[in-house]
Image: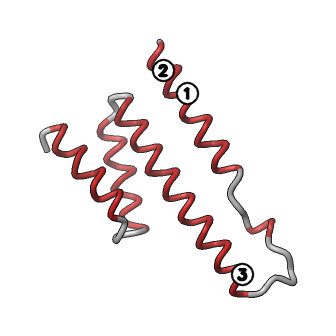
């Protein structure tokens, strides 16, 4: 029960982080293309970081397969993400894969 509450608390924190990211609604019609690209790049980085954190939470909740799936999906979106590569490597080493 306590572990479940810890996971729920972490998920709520991730949801708050995601809600604080900049979205397309925050982009005014007069903003430059460069500024829009920076906003989208920032949002993308934050979204990938939140997904990475979600995968870690899944691992901590002993949901290794779901955690692995999330890490692998992140790598499909961002194949050069060294942090996620390292996390997946650690997950595989700890689970005997």
Residue topped by disc 2: 4
Callout 2: SS: helix
Residue 59 lies in quadrant: top left
Separation of disc 2 and disc 1 at Cα? 6 Å
Q: Secondary structure at mark 3?
A: helix
| Crowd class of label 2 (few under 14; some 14 to 19; many from 20; radius 10 Å) | few
How far apart are labels 3 and 2 at the CA level? 41 Å
Cα distance, mark 1 to mark 3?
35 Å
Give residue 8's mark.
1
Of tags 3 and 2, the one toward the viewer is 3
Looking at this view, name the residue that lies furthest to the bottom: 33
Measuring from the top left, give residue 92's x and y in whole percent. Answer: 20, 46
Residue drawn at the location 64% of the way across and 50% of the way down: 18
Could you classify mark 1 by the number of other residues whose Cα lies within 10 Å: few (under 14), some (14-19), or many (20 or more)? few
Residue 28 lies in quadrant: bottom right
Which residue is under mark 3?
A: 35
| Residue drawn at 38 percent across, 28 percent down | 61
Query: For the C terminus, which image quadrant?
Result: top left
Residue 32 x, y percent position in the rendering: 77, 87
Pick whichever, 55 or 35, lies toward us: 35
Q: Earlier in the sequence, mark 1 or mark 3?
A: 1
For residue 38, above or below residue 84: below
Q: Crowding at label 3, few (<14), some or many (≥20) Cα neighbours within 10 Å?
A: few
Q: CB under 8 Å between callouts 2 and 1?
A: yes
């Amino acid at each position: 029960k306590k572990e479940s509450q810890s996971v729920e608390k972490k998920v709520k924190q991730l949801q708050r982080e995601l809600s604080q990211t900049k979205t397309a609604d925050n982009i005014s019609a007069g903003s430059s293309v460069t500024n829009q690209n920076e906003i989208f790049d920032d949002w993308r980085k934050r979204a990938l970081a939140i997904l990475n954190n979600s995968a870690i939470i899944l691992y901590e909740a002993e949901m290794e397969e779901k955690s692995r799936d999330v890490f692998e999906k992140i790598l499909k979106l961002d194949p050069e993400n060294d942090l996620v590569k390292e996390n997946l490597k650690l997950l595989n080493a700890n689970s005997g894969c």
